[in-house]
Each structure stands twice: as structure tokens, then as C-alpha cells.
Image (cartoon, helix red, strand yellow):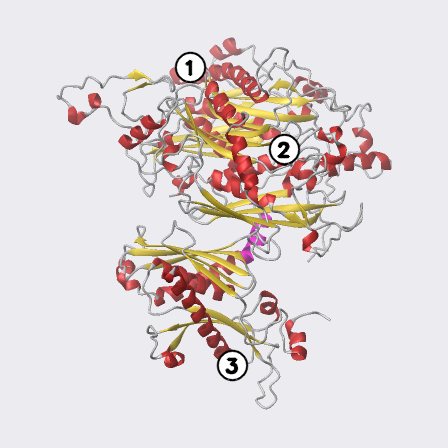
Amino acid sequence: MSNQRQASSASQTPHLSPAELSYLYTSLSLPRAPIRPDGRSPTQFRPLSAESNILPGTNGSARIGFADGTQAIVGVKAEVERTNLATDTLASQSDVNDSEEHQGSAAVSGHGSWVQMSIEIPGFRDDDALPVFLSEMMRESLVGSVTEGSGKADAADAAEMAGGLKGRLVINKRWHWRLYIDVLLLSQPLSYPLPLLSLTTHLALLSTKLPKLKSQGEEDPFFDDDWAVAEYLYPRISSQKTKLPSQYVRPPVTLLVISVGENVIFDPNREEIAVADAVLAISLTRDSEAGSLKLLSIRTIDPPSRLTQPAVPNSENVNMLGAPAPTEDIAVLNPVTGEEEVPGVWRPRRGGIKRSVIANMVQTVLKKGGVGEDVLEGLEGVEVE
Amino acid sequence: MPLDTSTTYPLTRLRLDGRRWNELRLLQAQISTNPASSGSSYLSMGNTAIMCSVHGPAEGRRGEATGAAGSAGAIVEVDVNIAGFAGVDRKRRAGGSDKYVQFSLRSISQSSRIATTLRSAFQSHLHAHLYPHSTISIHVSVLSSDGSLLAAAINACTLALVDAGIPMPGLLCGCTAGMSGSASTPRDPRHDELDPLLDMSAPEEQELPFLTVGTTTALPVGENNMDEEEEESKVAVLNMDSKLHCSYIETMLAVGMDGCGQIRELLEGVIKGTNRG
Amino acid sequence: MNDRRRVNGPPGGTRPPVYASLLETGTGAGDRSQRQRQPAELRKICMHDDNLSAPAYQTNLWHFRTSVLKTGLIPSASGSSYLEFEPSASLTAARANPKSLIPPSSALKLACTVHGPKPLPRSAAFSPNLVLTTHVKYAPFAARKRKGHVRDSSERDLGVHLETALRGAIIAERWPKSGLDITITILEAEDDRWWGDAPDSHDASWGMMNVLAGCISAASAAIADAHIDCLDLVAGGVAALVSNDSTNSSSSAPRLMLDADPAEHRSIVSACVVAYMPARDEITELWLKGDSSKASLAAGDQRTGHEALIDGAVDAARGAYTVLAEAVRESLQRAFDQS
């Protein structure tokens, strides 16, 4: 049990026989026209229902349910916290200008540890490998999405979102917001839960509001009691100049992409991920300057196909000894994996990914009119509020 | 002047949230919310919101369910998870540092206490003997907590178990009841200042003594013997951990059981409404 | 309740005070050591021969002295390795001629042990493959800030990365129903930033990526030392996009550096770790983070930023591979001599 839990590879492997795996692999790796078990196109996502702002007790919340019944609820809570001037390296006795300069730079940029993320998955303890890996992955792209340098280009515009999410959490030099993002998966995951969790977190952050600040400058902060005037964490209209909705600053999304043969397939379900040659989690966001997509992080995920049971070709099968070896039972070189394989006989995947495959997967996500844009547009279509 | 029920109630006869002593909060419920489980429900009592899903009866894991204990009937497993964002302040801390232990102790002990109570209540309530060697696992997620957590969890579990089609003699409904003062002196029947309160909210739970009662009807109640319902109802859960003079208990219990009756009607409405649709 | 009878130390740790005047550039003592290597030049990880008695090693490996990748140090384990990155040359110089009491940078030192293949515990489910478990733990004294004894999330995260990197290389189906435990203790970790920078200046854990690359190489050597069949040795490599200049950040775009030491650069924009198998030209683990879109590459270079980063990390891994191969040869030689 504990060993299975430790296995961080893309969730539990379904109990498919080698013959089933081989059949799945063959149909998914058909050149340029993979046949998926549920009839989707390679870039099509599973249907889902989404709603946001469902919990009145949180700053922002969202729920997404896939058609197969897996649901996730994300609640975002913000607390005011004193900024620990952990700058014991910075002397108080030096001249004031100098120290202020230093503090200023620290306070504007914010700190990644101000965003805390915890993921609860039934059947896992919250320090098991899978929840930890998932939360680190999503947190990393969240706090990493800094729009550096944009402050100079368009000062008024970028001031609101300078430093990305981290910068937005700064209240003043001595106070900041701490953001707790709690992700709750309501049932045992049927497939690798990353897309579900990432989309839900995105929606929850979009609906997150922080109370309007009434104090000014370096005063101890106090806030407007009126929740109606609270401001969105991700501002809706950053200024009058940017009218295109695509230029709003948005939280990142993380997509799960698998490659099977030469095909790149999105939002795999559990059976598909079980035969994948490679699994990548790609985080992206909109580049507010260029208007295109920006890559934030890539992580490989251990493909569960490495843990599957191999099949035995007839030529090596003891039970078939003596029977004439069928003619088609001849090993051929699989051009993708570079290994000798008998067609129709499942071998667990070995080795890694070619660089060209990675480049192809990233390209499919990022290209103009590609899947990344589709997903972000779809999410923008979910009416918040 | 602190604004709380114990100070405002004697003056206005209204509680802090504007209810009278015998009023329930708005109860909304829904069943079959999660298609992936055998039965599921969503229930909100005021600002307390709970989602519950039931898996099973399914073949139990090796060990307890297949052993001697399992042959008598299904084993009920309850898992209660209070979300970090459920309360006013966020309680739990992510990550495994030392702080985590301190912070989470309270919420974990609360959730495990609720889980134990639910498990023993439903283990004896359900007709578990119909499913030997199997497990019924109940997963309760508290999304937002504003008092009467145990009572709301009981109600949500009942709905989810009904949705899963697990036979039980009647609906098990829970409700809280408290007193409108600290009630530390014996009750004076001639000069009764304190009123019992129905369905406590979180601020009231913190300042006033209260108890949680869960009742069930022993037999399915038909249309003809509706008036006998009061006699038929049995207490299945009774939980109190605050200090109070013993002369008040009877009043509180009566009010709580009356509240359970009201909730039972509401829950029956939810179940029947879903069937009709 | 305070203990009033004794003079107690401060409850938290202490660090020597650093005065802001030291941090101003030009005063000398607190200067950030700048990188003196070429962008594509790697730090040396080499064989160490101090404790080896067999004369063969001394003659063969005499010319590598600076730092260590060594196998078979822990006799109770079926395979083990010890890896040490040499601190950057500039930092070594600063260390030799100290202007400040604080060491300018830390190097990477880690030990890896492999236990197994061994039978799975009775309670475990059947597995047709070798079950790999990885534990990465920082020693409490490994970083400038003390680490607790319980593994925290970054350590667990590293463990998952390492597991992914190794599982692709091991031929797992040759050991059904068995387990392999890989434990890495990090004795000294790379810094995430230069110690003189304000702790908040950038907080992404770039040092962790260097640590991961080291873990991958060391674990690969230890697995080979334990004689477990692999497709190839897996070498870890890091590349980063760094912007060094402090004054005008708009003037120059970040440049690609192989094997970047976070202590040497003002800011790292983006970094990438790969676990790479040169014989198959395949990547078993890729971890890229940060904004790689603004990289300034050589003229005529058509690659996008992230592709350049991945290629850079692969080049770094190739460099580590040569050392790795040498270490494995040494391990084999020793096994051969013993038999």
C-alpha cells in the first residue's frame, strides 16, 4: 500500500492486460489520426461543468466537475501578515536612503512563500508524493509568473500587476497578504488529477477578491468593510488602454500532455495515460506584452507505462513451444522508442524522450491558435460572478 | 458592549442573526451531486455547507471486513475532512513544518471526533447485516463551517446513504439545541429567564452551552399514523461537551428533538422531490 | 514560561551581522563574486584519489584532483557514491583570500546509497517490475538556513524528480517482485542566491535545480556501482538564463549559461534541469521553470528560448557524463580486483 502510494507516477495504473495496452497504444499511435477510446480528437478536452464563487466564507472559490464524476473544489483565503524584514543582513544603522532602497526592492517583488498551496486527495496523506508534487508544480508557475521589466514600458498599467501575483500581495513595506490556496479533490482520482486541479485553481484565483485598502502608504493597513467594493486579485480591466480581454493578466494554467507514437494528445484519461510514451505538464500564461502565450514551466511526469506488465511474444512463450511460429511474429524496430518490438505485443516503455518530441509537444501547446489559447479562451468564457 | 446572543437575547428575544428561539436556519439540500460515487449529497444549514459521498456497499479490504467482524454485516467507515478554508480563519498550514502540527491538531481532533460519532451512529442505524463482508465508506467534506457541524454531517450522511440505496429503518436527523445563557444555576420554574435555542451557529456555540441530538423513527412512518410520530422517534446520537446545570437538559433535549422532527420533514421533501424529478 | 535561571541563547539561530555598507558595490569585502568561466564552461566534477590505495588509480586519475565523484564508499550498501562540486573558481579565490567571514558560496556535497534489489515486503502488492523508492534529505546543516529532520515539501519534490529520472533508465522488468531504495543525503547544498542579496530579492529555489542535477548523476553512479542493469548512465545537467547587470536591466537580455551557480549571478530568469542518457540521446527527466521567452541567443539562432535552455542543459549533462563514466569504470575496476 505504502509502496503504491509512493509511486508518484501518473496516479494509479488501471489494471489493463498487456493485450489491452497494446491495442490502446496501437490505436492512439496511428499516424496523424489517433483513435481515442472515447472518440475525442487529440486536442479535445473532456466536457466539464464549472462554477465559481460558491463559498461565501472564502475570498475566492470554484468548483469543477468532470463528466465522469471527479470534482474538485478550490478555496482561496487571504490573511494580512506582517512582512518579516528578514533582512538581518541589512543594517539599520546605515544611512536611511540606502536601507529604504533595499527594502523597497524586496517589498515590491514580494515573496514566493506568501502563496501557500495544499492539495487534499482522498486516499493520500497530504505529505505523500503525489499531492506534494502537484502542489509544488502549480505553486511554482503561480509565483513564477513575473512580468519582469514591463514596469518600465507602461508604468501605470503594469503598476497594478508588477511582479505578477507576488507583487500584488504586497500591501506596503511592512505588510502583505498571505494567500492560502486549498484544493480539495472530492473523490479518488480516476485519472491524473492535474488538469482538473489546475483549471479549478485558475477559476478560483480569477474570482478571488481582496478587501479595498483604505489606509495609505506605510500606515498599518485597514480595509473597507464593504465587500462590494473589494478588488479582484487579478484585476479585470487593468487600464483604459487595453481593451482586448486577452491582455488582462491571468493566472497560469497547467496542461497535461502525452505523446503516443508520433501523436500529441491532450487531457488524457486514465487508460490513455497508461500507454503514454511521455507525459509532460506544461504551465503557460498569457504574455501581457506580446499578447501571445508564454511558457512558465515544464515538468516530466513519470509515465505509468513503465510500470505495466510486459507481454510475451509467441516465439518466447513456453506454452506455444512446438507450435509453428507465426510469420508476423517478427521483431521490428519501433522508430519512436528505438527498440525492437513485436507488433501487438506490449512492452513497458523504457528510456526517455527525444528532444524533438518535447519540442513538438511544447510547440503544439504554444503555437498561435493552438491548444493553449483554446483553453485560456474557454476559461475566460466562464462567467465569474 | 459585546454583541453576542447572551447579551442581546434577554433584551430583544432575538438571536444575533435575527432568529427567534425556535427557528432553524435556512436548510438547503441536494442529493446525487456526484455521479462517481454510489450516493452523494450536498447540505447547507445556514453558512455550514457539507458535501458527502458514499461508496459501497463494496467488497471490503482484507483484514477487518473479511474477518469475523465482517461476517456480521457491513462495516461503516467514515472519513471527515474539514477544509482549510472552512472556518473564519484558515486553520491548517500546508507543508510539513513544526507549525503544521500545532495548527492542525485542533481541526484534526474535531474531524476525527465527528467521524467516530458518525461511524458508531450509522453502524448501528443501517441494516448492515444485509451486506456481510463488505464496507460502506462515507466521505464527508466540510466546505464551510458555521456551527452545528455534527448535526449537519449527520443529515448530509443520511441523504447520501438514502441516495446510495442502503436500507435503514428511518431517516437519522441531527440538530443542536442550546440555552440562551450560561445556565449554571438550577432552573427556577416560576421565574424562567432562559430560553432554549434551536440550531446553534458558530458564535453561539462558542459562548453558550449546547448539545447535539440525532433522532430516528424506528419504523417507516405512514400517512395514517402521522400523529404517533412523536412517540416513535428514538434518540440515536446525543453529544454534549459543555457545562450546564442538569435541570435544563430536559428542555434542551425536547427542543432539539423537535428540531430533528422539522429537519426530517425537510429532508423527506428533498428526497421525494428528487424522486419526482 | 521563561527560564530565568540561566543565560539562554537566542531562540532562533544567529547569523553574523552584515552591515549595509558592505553590500554597496565597490567597498570590496561583500562583493558578489562574478562568474569568470565562459558561459559554456562547466565546473569540474572529477575523480578523487586521496583515499584510494591501489596504485592503478593514482596513475590513471592523478590529473583530476579538484573535486569528487566517487563510488563504493559505503560498504554496507549495495551501491554508493559521493559527489562534490567544486566551488566556482572565483569563489575559491575569494575563499583563499577572505575579505568577509562569511564564505562567499557553498559547494554541493552529497552522498547516495542504493539498497537492493531486495524482495518486497510481504504486505506489498505484486509488481512485475523493480519498485524504485527515492529519498532525498538535506542534512540539517546543509544550507544556510537549518533544515528540520522531517522531510519538507521541497525534499519530497526532489525525490519525485529523481525517481522519474532514474526509472526511465533502469531496466525494471529484470527484477520482478523486488524493491530498490535510493537514499541521498545532501551534506552541503548550493545557495539559492548570493548570501548578500536581500532574502526576498528572488526566492525561487534555483539552487535546488543544481542539487537535483547532482543527485541524478550521483544516483546513476551508485546504481551502476550496485550492478543494476540500466539502458545507459543518466547524467544530470543544468542550464540557466541569467541577467548579470545590476543597473539597467532593459539594456541586455538574459544570456544562456551552462551550470550556473546562483551565487554568481544577480538574477536567474529561467533554468532547466535534464536527466540525459547520451547513448540514446534521450531525456528521462525535464524540469524547466521561469520565463525563457526573452533569451538573447547568438545571431541566426532560430531556436526558441526553452529549446536553447534544454539544449544547454543537455550539453551540461554531456559534460557530467564523462566524469560519470570514469567513476563507473573505477567502480568496475574495484569489483574486478576484489574478485
Alpha carbons under labels 1 and 3: distance apart: 87 Å
Could you tell me residue B197's position as x and y percent?
56, 75
Q: Quadrant of the N terminus of chain A?
A: top left
**Residue B156 lies in quadrant:** bottom left
Magenta range is: B95-107
Identify the image quadrant of residue B41: bottom left
Q: Nearer the viewer, mark 1 or mark 3?
A: 3
Q: Is B96 contained in the magenta span?
A: yes
Kindly identify the amino acid type of the residue bearing the numbered disc 3: Thr
Residue receiving disc 2: C204
Spatial distance from mark 3 to mark 2, Cα to Cα? 60 Å
Q: Which residue is mark 3?
A: B251
Q: Which mark is residue C110?
A: none
Horizontal and vertical percent position of residue C19? 80, 34
Question: Same chain, marks 1 and 2?
Answer: yes
Q: Which SS class for mark 3?
A: helix
Whether C186 is drawn above or below B15: the answer is above
Q: Nearer the viewer, mark 3 or mark 2?
A: 3
Residue where numbered disc 1 is placed: C333
Mark 2 belongs to which subunit? C
Q: Which of B152/C10 is in front? A: B152
Q: Residue at x 68, y 43 (%)?
A: A169
Mark 1 or mark 2: name the one nearer the start of the chain: 2
Q: Amino acid at mark 2?
A: Ala
Secondary structure under tag 2 reads loop
Q: Residue at x 36, y 70 (%)?
A: B170
Q: Give the prevailing secondary structure in the magenta stretch.
A: helix
Residue B105 image position (x, y, % from top left): 54, 56
